[in-house]
Amino acid sequence: DVKVTQSSRYLVKRTGEKVFLECVQDMDHENMFWYRQDPGLGLRLIYFSYDVKMKEKGDIPEGYSVSREKKERFSLILESASTNQTSMYLCASSSQVVLFLQGYTFGSGTRLTVV
Amino acid sequence: AQSVTQLGSHVSVSEGALVLLRCNYSSSVPPYLFWYVQYPNQGLQLLLKYTSAATLVKGINGFEAEFKKSETSFHLTKPSAHMSDAAEYFCAVSAPYSSASKIIFGSGTRLSIRP
């Protein structure tokens, strides 16, 4: 089975801290995605990447950046954490070739609280 | 452009009753459609997918969905609800986008099961 692993399940950070959320997938997928999930708002796409060192903005990129130095790893960076970034963060990956057959594979999520 | 609309943010049924979660889509090209399930404090898991092979699609845990082009719908059903079905369900449509194909998610429907 494809595995998408997010490094932390729960994280508490202080306002103004630089925060790194890590995501690793083990199936050589080209595409990787970062979403945040908030009650009543569903999933909102922050950034995605379709290749190493490539990235594209999603719907809500403000306050975030990403890094993809290796194909299997996609990092989300909160440059200066704020309380409105308290949320559940979900990482996903997919194969560009068989996206429509397999969909996305999601990690278990990181629940980030900024105090 | 593709989009999905899930009717009802919260659905409550009795154990043993029919489950019906509604999803309507909009797509300028033949769509690929998905249903995902999210159990508490977990990531999303693929429940089933429509990829034009058959209009009635069977998924895991006894769920199925029927693609109706004339109604632009892809409703999710289960004949008899179990307590373990309590979760959030997301309908999604594929969307070719720039360099990476993406999946567009609905806002989700929370399913509660009454004893």
Image: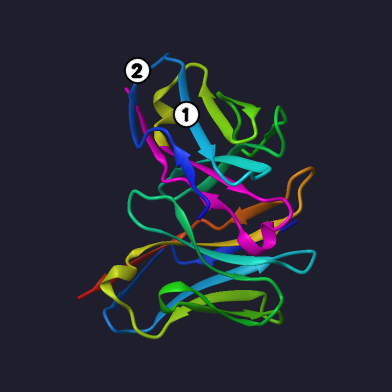
Rendered view: B58 above or below A37 = below
Q: Chain of mark 1?
A: A
> What residue do we see at 59% from left, 61% from top?
B92
Looking at the picture, tell me which residue is in the foreground, A69 or A1: A1
Find numbered disc 2 in the image and state the secondary structure of the residue it sits on: loop
Looking at the picture, tell me which residue is in the foreground, B102 or A114: B102
Hey, what amino acid is under mark 1? Leu
- Give percent across and percent down for residue A53: 71, 27
Numbered badge on residue A14: 2
What separation in Å lies between label 2 and label 1 (alpha carbons)?
A: 15 Å
Q: Which residues are magenta?
A: A88-115
- Give percent across and percent down for residue B29: 80, 65
Find numbered disc 1 in the image and state the secondary structure of the residue it sits on: strand
Rendered view: B17 above or below A23 = below
Hey, what amino acid is under mark 2? Arg
> What residue do we see at 43% from left, 29% from top?
A84
